[in-house]
Image: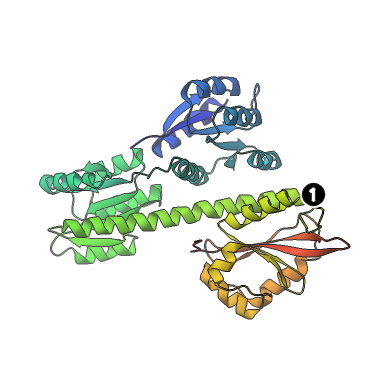
Amino acid sequence: MEKYKVLVIEDDDTAREQLAKVIRKEGFQVLVAENGRAGLEVFKKELPEIVVSDLKMPDIDGLEVIHTVRRLSTNVQVILITAFGETETAIAAIREGALDYLEKPLDLEQLTLALGRARERIVELRERAFVPALLLADDEDKIRERLSREMEKEGWQVFAAADGEEAISLFKVNKIDIVILDIKMPKKDGLQALHEMRSMNDDFETIILTGHGDEDTAIQALRDGAINFLKKPIDLEQLILSVEKGLEKLQAERALKYRTRDLELATEIIGCIGLKNQILIDLRRGAPKSTRDFAQKLIDLMPMGLLVLNRDMTIVYMNRYVAQALQYRPEKVDEEFVKSVGKMGIKDLSYESLMSAVNTLSSALSGTVETISTGKYSYITLAPMRIVREEEQENAVLIIIRGERCKAS
C-alpha cells in the first residue's frame, strides 16, 4: 500500500515531533521542517501530497506556504494549524485552496479527521482505490497463516498477530481498518484487546472468531461494537463477505464525517463572507450570463441540498440535489416538504421550527448563521441573503441541508 507523504512545517520542536508521531501512526510517510523556508525547500525536493503547516512562523508564514506549494502542485492538500484569534485568516486560506484548519491546542481526533479527508481527496484525484489494512489475531499458526494468505489475495494488506498483546502493539503503530480477533488467545484475549484498541481510537470495525462454547463471549463482543462473529472452523467465503461489509460500513461512516466537516467549513465561510459582504442572488438581466451559468453548475454539483426561500416559505431556488432526492419540485416549504426531506436523511425536524428559523433569518443582520440539528451527523444551516431584481430587492434565506444518508445521482 502506498504511503502518502505528509510534510509537517512547525517551528516548535515539541509540537513538530508530536505531529510527526501521530501522522505516522495514521499510515503516512512524514517529512519535517522547522520553518516555512525550510519547508518549501523540502516540498520542492519531495513533492508531498499533504502539507500540515503552522499559520504563524517567523520567516515565511502559512499563507505564503499555501500560495507557493499550490503553484508547484495543484493537487496538494494543505492543513493549517492556528492559534486563538486566527480563525478569520484560516477561513480566508480555505477560500484560497487550503483543505482545513486546526486550532491550538490540537485535538488529535480533528487532526486524523482532516488527514482522512485529505487522503480521500487524493484518492479521488488519482482515481485510485484505497487499500484497506486488516489486523488478524489468532494463536493457531496454521489458521492465521491460511487466512492471511487468502485475504492478501483479495488485495488487502494484512498484519498478523499470534496473541492479544502483539495485536495491540501492531494496532498502536499502524492505521487499521478491520480488526479480526480470536476470542481465546494467550497474554490477552480478544475482548481485552478490543477494549484497549477502542480506548485508542474508534475508527475501525471488528470481526470476532470463536470456538465451541464461546458464544456468550462473542455476544458480549457484539455489544462492545463488533459487527459479526464467526465460528471455527472458519468459512473463508463468509469471512471475506464480513470484511467487505465492514469496509463498506466504515467507508460510509468516514465519508459522512468528512462531508460533515466540509459543511462546517462551508458554514463558517458563509458566516465570514456575511460579516463583510451580504450574500446576494443577482437576477438582473445585466448580470453576466457566464457568471450565472457557472454559479448554477457549481451549486448543482454540491453534494448537499441547497434552497433559497422567501419569508412566506416560497421556494425561490432549489438545487438539483434536492430535486433528485425528493423526486418532485415543490413550490413552497410546507409540512409535506418537511416529511419528504426524510429521504435525505433528515428525521428530527418539525415544520414549526423550520418556519420560525426562516422568519427570524429573513430579517436578520448579514453574517448571522443558524443551525438546526436533525441527527448525529445531520443538520440544516440557514443564513440571510438578498435577491436583487431589476426594480427591487427582497430578503430571503439560504438553507443548506446535510442529511445522514444522502446520495446524489
Residue at image position (54%, 30%) is 73
Residue at image position (42%, 43%) is 127
Q: Is residue 85 left or right of residue 188?
A: right
Around disc 1, counting alpha carbons within 10 Å, would you say few (fewer than 14), some (14 to 19), or many (20 or more)?
A: few
Tell me how the rendering is colored: rainbow
Quick one: quadrant of the N terminus? top left
Say which quarter of the image contains residue 21.
top left
Residue 231: percent from left, percent from top: 17, 62
- Asked if one can make out residue 39 in the rendered structure from this viewpoint, the answer is yes
The residue sitting at the right extreme is: 391
The residue sitting at the bottom extreme is: 336
In depth, the one of 223 and 408 nearer the eye is: 408
Residue 18 vertical placement versus 240 (above, below): above
Q: Is residue 36 left or right of residue 19?
A: right
Tally of marks = 1
- Asked if one can make out residue 186 in the rendered structure from this viewpoint, the answer is no
Say which quarter of the image contains residue 223.
bottom left
Residue, disc 1: 277
Residue at image position (59%, 54%) is 263
Residue 72 vertical placement versus 220 (above, below): above
In depth, the one of 24 and 320 nearer the eye is: 320
Badge 1 amino acid: Asn
Residue 56 vertical placement versus 256 (above, below): above
Residue 239: percent from left, percent from top: 22, 57
Secondary structure found at label 1: loop
Residue 282: percent from left, percent from top: 78, 56
Residue 128: percent from left, percent from top: 39, 42
Residue at image position (23%, 55%) is 240
